[in-house]
Image (cartoon, grey):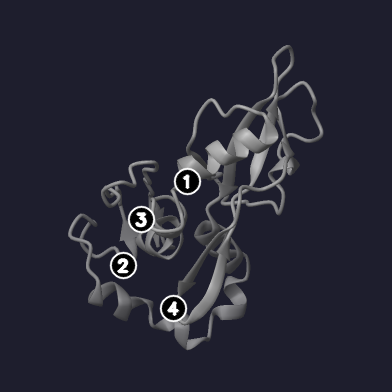
């Protein structure tokens, strides 16, 4: 799941492609110049909750208690547009949020939830609907086809410390997952 997220999404929005897209950091710098704001950290923050909950708007976190830090959505970064897998002009967009804290100036960040975990949470919610499908019955086959020699023996779908180093020029993000299918 982590590799799919990286290859299917992060690789398109983080590194400089050597042509039209100057990379995630340059995209933030353009945003700063246009909106006259400053980002203390020019990285993408991925929000991962214990229950995998991903609201449509991150402002939904802590919105009912103004004593806690809370988020406000701003305009998005400039779209990244690429031809990918037969889709012409596919658009990738990153959201910008302001973090408000009592007694401090707002802080700008690029943040989002990890969409594969959002999908996993939805599948877990609807597990009974998928019970008799071929897709879930195929999981042991997939596990055998792509073994994880770090997994405890006999635990299908178990991934531990699935961290990897992004391609060169893309050290803007590091991902670390612990996922266990039940």
Quick check: marks 4 and 3 in contact, CB under 8 Å? no
Q: Determine the CA span between mark 1 and mark 2.
A: 36 Å
Quick check: marks 1 and 4 in contact, CB under 8 Å? no
Q: Residue at x 54, y 25 (%)?
A: 40
Q: Is residue 43 left or right of residue 129?
A: left
Q: Which badge, 3 or 2, is on the more N-terminal residue?
A: 3
Q: Determine the CA span between mark 3 and mark 2.
A: 40 Å
Q: Determine the CA span between mark 2 and mark 4.
A: 30 Å
Quick check: marks 1 and 3 in contact, CB under 8 Å? no
Helix, strand or loop under label 2: loop
Q: Which badge, 4 or 3, is on the more N-terminal residue?
A: 3
Residue at which label 3 appears: 18
**Which percent across, then down, holds residue 156?**
31, 67
Residue at which label 2 appears: 156
Q: Determine the CA span between mark 4 and mark 3.
A: 19 Å
Q: Residues within 10 Å of mark 3 (few under 14, many from 20)?
A: few
Quick check: marks 1 and 2 in contact, CB under 8 Å? no
Q: Residue at x 32, y 60 (%)?
A: 158
| Quarter location, residue 98 | top right
Q: Which badge, 1 or 4, is on the more N-terminal residue?
A: 1
Q: Which mark is residue 24?
A: 1
**How many numbered marks have been drawn onto this rendered protein structure?**
4
Residue at which label 4 appears: 85
**Which percent across, then down, holds residue 101?**
70, 20
Helix, strand or loop under label 1: helix
Helix, strand or loop under label 4: loop
6 is higher (above) or lower (below) than 49: below
**Which percent across, then down, holds residue 12?**
44, 59
| Quarter location, residue 180 | bottom left
**Which percent across, then down, holds residue 32?**
61, 34
């Amino acid at each position: 799941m982590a590799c799919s997220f990286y290859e299917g999404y992060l690789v398109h929005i983080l590194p400089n492609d050597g042509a039209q897209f100057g990379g995630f950091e340059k995209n933030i710098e353009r945003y700063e110049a246009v909106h006259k704001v400053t980002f203390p950290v020019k990285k993408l923050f991925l929000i991962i909750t214990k229950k995998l909950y991903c609201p449509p708007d991150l402002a939904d976190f802590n919105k009912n208690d103004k004593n806690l830090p809370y988020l406000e959505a701003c305009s998005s970064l400039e779209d990244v547009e690429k031809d990918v897998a037969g889709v012409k002009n596919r658009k990738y967009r990153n959201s910008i949020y302001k973090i408000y804290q009592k007694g401090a100036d707002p802080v700008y960040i690029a943040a989002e939830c990890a969409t594969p975990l959002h999908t996993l949470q939805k599948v877990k919610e609807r597990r009974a609907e998928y019970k008799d499908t071929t897709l879930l019955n195929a999981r042991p086959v997939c596990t055998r086809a792509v073994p994880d020699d770090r997994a405890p023996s006999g635990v299908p779908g178990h991934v531990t410390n699935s961290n990897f180093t992004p391609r060169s020029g893309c050290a803007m993000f590091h991902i670390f997952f612990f996922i266990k299918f039940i």
